[in-house]
Amino acid sequence: MTSLPFSPQEYELRRAAVRAALAERDIDLLYVTQPSNLYYLTGYEASWYPPRLPVGALIDRDSSTVVILDWDRHAGYVKSCVLGDDFVLFRYGEAAEAISRFFASRGWLSRSLALEWSSPTPAAPVVGELARQLTAAGIRIDSGDWVVDNIRLYKSNAEIACVRKAAELADRAMSKLWRELRPGLSELEVSARMTELLAQQGSEIAAMPTLVNSGPNAWRDVHSFPSNRALQAGDILTVDCCAVVRRYHANLGRTFILGSRTTRAREIIQNGAGSFEVLRSQARLDGDPAAAMAAAERYVRDRVPAENIWWIGGYNLGISFPPSWVGHTYLANDGLQKCRLANGCVFNYENIYSDREEGFEAGCIDTLVMTEAGLQLLSTLPRQLLDVSL
């Protein structure tokens, strides 16, 4: 087998945790289709997952055996590069029937099966048809959403090493970009150059492209794709990227100003920058992140006008595939799934500001790791408006 990203022992610990979670919920089998979870448990990595096929892995709470279910055209890959014990391969239009036959051959028709309904692939009708056929065969269908996600929130030392390395790569690439920025480059060219610099440092392809916003309309385009707009002297420019090591992401965002200009962005970023230290100092090991997040947000709101605050917050990071690197829990702990700041959890933290009158988006984004010694900020770059000399 081609070398896996982690040791077989690391994968067995992950699978054992999933089996324990299934036993706790009285579920027999879990069908894992979310790409990040599939990678976490088997090392399966792809740039594209057929939306019409239920590519995935079956985890059995009573056995260490893992079954890989995939397109027959992927046979060469899964049998040589993916950590699986058995393989069910199917063609378009035949997946549900092939999987039903496999369940029958294993004597599993009286067992319960949890599906990841919220997975970005395959398409919902494909999962629905699979569930319909398996239900007709006698299998009880349950929800497997967030089972694996909640386990991989808390990363091992080997995983954290990937995140730390990714953060170093991001810092180095952003520092190089800082020295290269100049008027005349388009946002697309800046994004492409940042991606190139990340690759030169050793980063893998990120789950989203590097975001670049500039100019007087940037305040309204926080999540827009980079455009053909050419940078001009005096522009305020934000760059939001991730470096990636073994699919583990570290997020970094900084704001630059091209040349000399008086701007409120400098004061706003400076006034809010102390919230990073507030978040770090208020975070408690095994505590609720919401308390630390609330303290950090209060710090910003006491110093920055509300109309200039786009978002103060963060979300968990880790293994990511397109189209997003955003995790399923937030520092505010206000989502469907709750978390705690246990050793090994990784978040980003964003201070994003805008000014419609002056016309800018500005802010800072860092990656955070919770350790036994407390919360650590991984970026060493200044949290301020970064001047580009022309």
Image (cartoon, grey):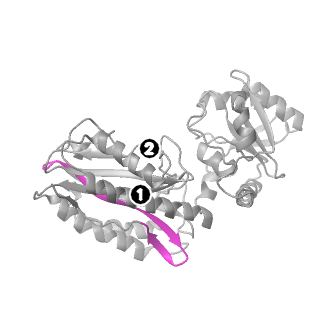
Which residue position holds label 2? 208
Classify residue 339 by image quadrant.
bottom right
- Above or below: residue 303 compared with residue 348: below
What are the residue bounds of the magenta stretch?
356-378
- Residue at the (29%, 66%) spot, across then down: 383
248, 63: nearer the viewer = 248
Q: Are marks 1 and 2 in contact (CB under 8 Å)?
A: no
Position of the C terminus, as image quadrant, is bottom left
Which residue position holds label 1? 170
Outermost residue, front side: 200
What amino acid type should be assigned to the residue bearing mark 2? Met
What amino acid type should be assigned to the residue bearing mark 1? Ala
Q: Nearer the viewer, mark 1 or mark 2?
A: 1
Task: Estimate the x, y position of residue 33 in percent, counting from the top left.
Answer: 65, 40
- Residue at the (40%, 46%) spot, across then down: 196
- Majority SS type along the magenta span: strand
